[in-house]
Image: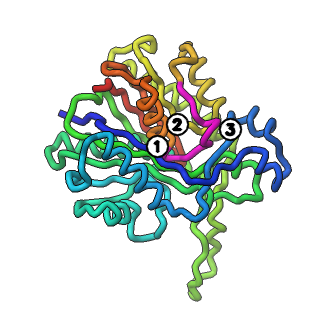
Amino acid sequence: MGLKIIGTGKALPRKAVSNNEIADILETSDEWITTRTGIRNRYVCTDEGLTDIAESSARVALRKAGVEAGDIDLIICPTLAGDFVFPSLACCLAERLGVKCPAFDVNAACSGFVYGLEIADALITAGRYGCILIVSADMMSRLVDWGDRATCVLFGDGAGACVVTQGDAIKYIKTDSYPNSEMLFAKNRNGNNPFTKSERGNGYVQMKGQEVYEFAVKAVASEISEALEKTGLSAEDVDHFVLHQANGRIVDSVRKRLKQPIEKFPVNIHNYANTTAATIPILLDEMVNEGKVKKGDVLVMVGFGAGMTTGTCVMVWE
């Protein structure tokens, strides 16, 4: 016994920022951004906090699942950072929902949603919990340097949620790391400790773009091949490859390696940019809303991100 997803949800900030708006403040252009990334638009928080959009996505998922907040017995929040250093985003969300249950965050960067699924699957299988809320949410607008066109154009804010309960949907799940702290990172900002002279950092995202691209294409293709081999499936058996939305070129490169049609690789990065841990659940919610996911469909979900981390899941939709 494992889990199945019974409700999905997403939420975005009110403020949409187009490439042209970024070009007004940086030396860049819509063409430059679009051709290199596939991104045309992103959403950024202005007067909202991360807890606000996390709550909104959670309430949508609960409503679609037909579940009351009080029925949730565990909350997992994959995120890079909530509104506070502490308490966790998960605890802040539990407070908003009026729920008293265990609640904790998971930081696996852009692989976070699959990490959350694996934790939930193991705990449900062990009989510890019966109804778990997973909310992936990140506010990258406060972690990027808005004077650095190489990074700030890539990211957006958003939240994606799902409610999971007992089921047999997951046929394979694997999380892994390829430890590298220099390829993609954001150091903690300096405090005012008078007893240290160590340099910490400015807190902004630093990225070796070409190395990240090469890692992602190689790692995702390899993880998918392993998942298919372990499950006895072929690429042709998969209905939807739901990949982390970091860069449109990465998704297309993986597709070409697998020799699969473009229709099997849904994308929405053009609308939202990279919302890190939230990209997969946001995309999944859109697919569900549009009727693109049907009972019996085979989904392969793959996240990849700083760490470097990967998370791969083969799921048959119930």
Amino acid on which disc 1 is placed? Ser
Q: Residues within 10 Å of mark 3 (few under 14, many from 20)?
A: many
Q: Earlier in the sequence, mark 2 or mark 3?
A: 3
Amino acid on which disc 3 is placed? Ile
Q: Quadrant of the N terminus?
A: top left
Left or right placement of residue 237 versus residue 250 in this view: left
Report which quarter residue 232 is drawn in: top left
Tally of numbered discs:
3
* Residue that mark 3 sits on: 39
Badge nearest the viewer, 2 or 3? 3
Q: Which residues are magenta?
A: 266-278
- Residue 242 in the image: state x and y as whole percent: 47, 29
Badge nearest the viewer, 1 or 2? 2
Left or right placement of residue 148 versus residue 66 in this view: right
Q: Residue at x 25, y 61 (%)?
A: 99
Callout 3 secondary element: loop
- Residue 131 in the image: state x and y as whole percent: 22, 46
Q: Are marks 3 and 1 in contact (CB under 8 Å)?
A: no
